[in-house]
Image (tube, helix red, strand yellow):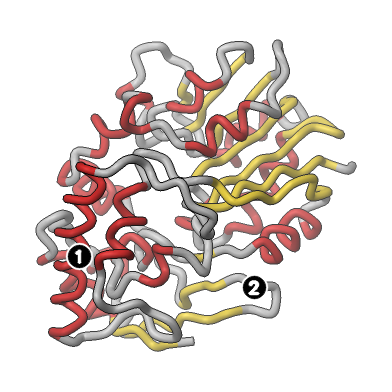
Amino acid sequence: MQSVSARLLADLWRFTPFFRVDARPSFHGTEQFELWESPTGLYFFDPPREGDREFYSSFYSNINMRKHLRAPGKGWRCEFDMAAGWVKPGDKVLDAGCGFASFRAAVPQANYTGLDPNFSEHDPSGVIRVQSLEEHLAEAASAYDVVCAFQVLEHLAAPLQFFQDMVRAAKPGGLVLAGVPHVPSANTRLPNFLLNAPPHHLTWWTKSALAELAQRSGAEPLSIENVPWGRQDALWYWMERCSPIKCRDRHFKADWGWHAATVAGWAGGFLASTLLPTPKTTDEGAGLLLVARRTK
């Protein structure tokens, strides 16, 4: 689809006031990324360079995401409400890559366990374990009624392996849920939109790609739905509406007109999201939620 200079992305990460993080160590000397579209509908960056711990430590600190994600009033995602509808009272729920365990508040009827080695130190309740999903499987394979991951797959160099591990953690017949950003969407139409770029987002998803992911992992897709806009996501919706440039076949460009469009999108989007209600539209929404059932 496009070649993207690693230097352009690194400079944008370093000098954009909202982030100011050094992505260069995460790039491991990569000079150029290629954005591809696979026959399944998955968009992916090659090479797939994940953000390291230092990158995310600076990232979350600089944008004050910790406070933003904690409170349901601000960090609540509509996908949480959609996912909670699949959880029955007493279900054992595993939330892989759970962040600050925000989904826990959506399923008070469940026996909740979260996994996130990067955020467990901020969890006074002790429900977040300092384990990777692979490590947790050594003691809890086929143990959960529902296994979920929200906004995790797009950060990983090997999303298929991670989803297969999610399926392994579910009981036979258990549910596996995944929330992801998607394409086309407001996010993918914004010029030089860093949150959709390496080393943060390595993949963009479609319904066909999610269906293929489930089927290759021993799971049957039951539902793949668009997630409506919420207060947390409304900023991206309004940014895209306010940007004078809308991306189609090219998403990143070292051009002052594109940089100006990004600034205009941020400024107009921030004002609109502050003054206007949550968007109620029939467009693509804020993401996709896959619900699949383990078949064996």
**For residue 247, side relative to residue 209 (left or right):** left
Quadrant holding the C terminus: top right
Residue 71 location, quadrant:
top left
The amino acid beneath tag 1 is Trp
Badge 2 density bin: few <14, some 14–19, many ≥20, Cα 10 Å: some
Question: Dot 1 corresponds to which residue?
Answer: 13
Q: Is residue 282 left or right of 126 when viewed as pictured?
A: right
Q: Is residue 35 above or below residue 121?
A: below
Q: Crowding at label 1, few (<14), some or many (≥20) Cα neighbours within 10 Å?
A: many
Give the residue number, with chain letter if any, for mark 2: 41
Label 2 near label 1: C-beta < 8 Å? Answer: no
Q: Which residue is drawn at 55% across and 46% down?
A: 227
Q: Looking at the image, is 137 positioned above or below residue 235?
A: above
- Above/below status of 107 relative to 14: above
Task: Write the residue at 28% across / 60% down.
Answer: 239
Image label count: 2
